[in-house]
Image (spheres, grey):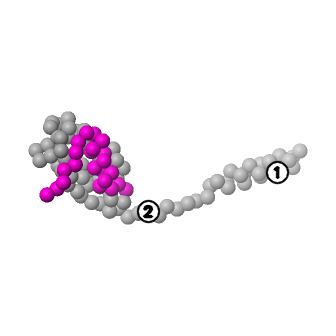
């Protein structure tokens, strides 16, 4: 009976350790980029707060500053984690438009 118990413990130990293989992720270097986005439809401070909240919810965003006076957002982000298209889509999801920069 002891041999059976030892065998059971050995099997459990081997089975538990088989799933603990170490994997190493290759970290992508950060590519910090600053972009200015012209936004249409900003009318008040609540609009500014909404855009800032939407953009800040994305992963890879370092900072976002929306200015009501000129309807722009200056976004600093990690380009290896988030794209400018994703940032613009998050603004559009909140009901605003992206203007072409002249």
Residue at the spot of label 2: 27
What residue do we see at 35% from left, 62% from top?
30
Horizontal relation, residue 92 to residue 12: left or right: left
Mark 2 neighbour class, 10 Å CA radius: few under 14, some 14 to 19, many 20 or more = few
* Magenta part of the chain: 81-102
The quarter of the image holding the C terminus is bottom left
Q: Is residue 7 above or below residue 51?
A: below
x%, y% of residue 76? Answer: 26, 55
Which secondary structure, mark 2? loop
Horizontal relation, residue 58 to residue 100: left or right: right
The quarter of the image holding the N terminus is top right
Residue 94 sits in quarter: top left
Labelled disc at residue 7: 1
Question: Which residue is more in the foreground, 90 or 62?
Answer: 90
Is 101 contained in the magenta span? Answer: yes
Question: Which residue is more in the foreground, 25 or 72?
Answer: 72
What residue do we see at 29% from left, 60% from top?
32
Q: Earlier in the sequence, mark 1 or mark 2?
A: 1
Q: Is residue 50 above or below residue 23?
A: above
């Amino acid at each position: 009976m002891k041999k059976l118990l030892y065998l059971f413990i050995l099997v459990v130990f081997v089975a538990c350790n088989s799933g603990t293989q170490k994997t190493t992720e290759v970290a992508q270097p950060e590519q910090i980029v600053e972009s200015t986005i012209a936004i249409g439809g900003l009318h008040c401070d609540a609009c500014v707060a909404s855009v800032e909240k939407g953009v800040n919810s994305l992963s890879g965003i370092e900072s976002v500053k929306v200015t009501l006076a000129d309807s722009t957002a200056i976004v600093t982000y990690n380009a290896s984690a988030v794209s400018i298209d994703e940032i613009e889509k998050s603004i559009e999801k909140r009901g605003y438009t992206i203007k072409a920069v002249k």
